[in-house]
Amino acid sequence: GMRLVTPASSEQFSLESAHQYDECYGLAYAQQLKNKDIPEGGSKAVVLIDTVGMSSSGRDFVMRKSVKAFVDTILDLVVDTEETREEIVDFVGKKEVLYLGPDEQVIPEDIDWVIKRATQRGYDTPAAFMSSKPRAGINHKEYGVTSEGVNVYLDVALQHVLKIDPKKESFTIKITGGPDGDVAGNELKILFREYGENAKVVGIADGTGCAEDPNGLNWEEMLRLVENNLPIDHFNPSTLGEGGAVHKVDTEEGVKARNSMHNRVQADAFIPAGGRPNTINVHNYNHFLNADGTPSSPLIVEGANLFVTDEARQLLFEEAGVIIVKDSSANKAGVITSSYEICAAMLLSEEEFFENKAQIVSEVLDKLHEYARMEAELLFREFENYGGSLPQLSKVVSGAVNAATDALTIALETFSEEDRDKLLPLFRAHLPKTMADLSFDKVHERVPSQYITNAVASCLASRLVYKEGTKFVETLPQDKLADIALRYLEAEHEIALLKDALEGTEMPEKEKESILKLLDAGGARTALGVF
């Protein structure tokens, strides 16, 4: 993910420069944690650009020029030519496959240029070098992919933590990020689509101000802003109920109200879906608490990266019992979508993708819901069974999947091509059905072998952890992890055959259903004899 940072003043530029590396490292680490379900590892790029005092056109010129300079530097590092072999010091010792994704202030024109430049520079799969391409991509904002995942975690958390069935009961929520933003705007649409008037948004804050209403902001007005890509300062005050207000940042009072909305407003759940990293930190986390020590929201689902620091997460949990679904879990659907787009760019021509785009996107959204729900259910199952803080459990889940992936990747590299091909159905099942049907017979021609190996490893690793839990994986000896994972796959196949055979037997349906559930829940693990 490449983001452009353009501070408004020299003082801000100095501040950003001082913690640019730390921010980039933190974002890359979070990316590695959330990339557990896909072949790609995590990384981040923060391009700090000095545009202080420039005109609007000058600022835009320098930003576009910086993108080009950065991309050329990356291509110098990963495209193997006689010239680069002479100049580049290679600490890795093997070919690297690297892709970019757009983040803050990257525009469609940048993406088009990057793809063309990758082609000119001889990158092996130039169409896959950057995601979110205007025609042959899956635009995150247009399809609301990140928010689709965030809302699954919200749904599961409301039921597990607050014992609220959002389909049947009302609940309150506050959001940072404007109606014109990607994650916040799409989350508003999804909330109304899924829960209607049951979802009462009592506060929204963005760069222009905030709107608050203890009885819930008017849905028609919020959706008007979303559809017209307007920030919150355009909210019509006449639609507010008693006690409602709109604050704009053109006054000192408005700035204070905007900056404190996420702390002041009382709600069942808080979704940070926009805002700067480290907004809630070890120095100010107590502002999120009421005078009696209770939290202004007992549940936080992090739609934005690093909005709450690690230390603040732990203190909010220890001192006020705040349950926080960490960013690396809650908003992982965006990176999964980008990964599917990378796969599509390798497997399909632009025309093939475009002709089947509607169906492929529909299947991608189904996959996002599936991956989000599997992890959400595992997180809360382990939280309820073993305790601990949810953010720490989120890291444990990512660590377990990534450890299994790494062990499997090393093991698979020792396999013959014939043995590796026996595992290809794992990669095929991971892909959206239409994408696989159109092209999987050409997977070896079009996809780098290292990518295929990583895909098989990550698919099997996440499957093992989501089904059996982190404790099972953590207790396995590291040198036996890959072997047991592969045996687990064979056991799953045997259990599937048993279930098929059982389906054809004559016995009371209730008993049959109970046996099938037992086989599904623990059959493969029992067959392994590993407990």
Image (tube, grey):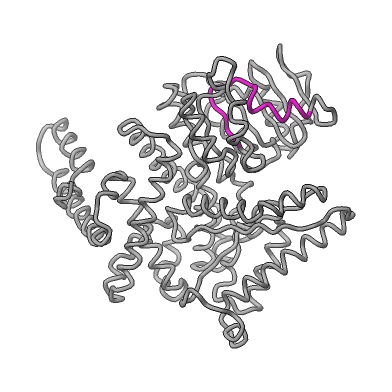
Q: Is residue 42 left or right of residue 497?
A: right
For the point 42% across and 21% down, which residue is it?
A: 163
For the point 55% across and 62% down, which residue is it?
A: 353
In terms of depth relative to the viewer, which is nearer, 217 or 496?
217
For the point 55% across and 24% down, which residue is it?
A: 297
Q: To which quarter of the image does residue 265 belong?
A: top right
Q: Which residues are magenta?
A: 255-272
Image height check: is 469 above or below 238?
A: below
- Residue 139, image x, y percentages: 62, 52
In terms of depth relative to the viewer, which is nearer, 255 or 356?
255
In terms of depth relative to the viewer, which is nearer, 256 or 215?
256
Q: Is residue 46 left or right of residue 486?
A: right
Q: Quadrant of the N terminus?
A: bottom right
- Residue 147, image x, y percentages: 56, 40
| The magenta stretch spans residue 261 | yes
Q: To which quarter of the image does residue 434 belong?
A: bottom left
- Residue 47, image x, y percentages: 69, 59
Q: To which quarter of the image does residue 225 belong?
A: top right
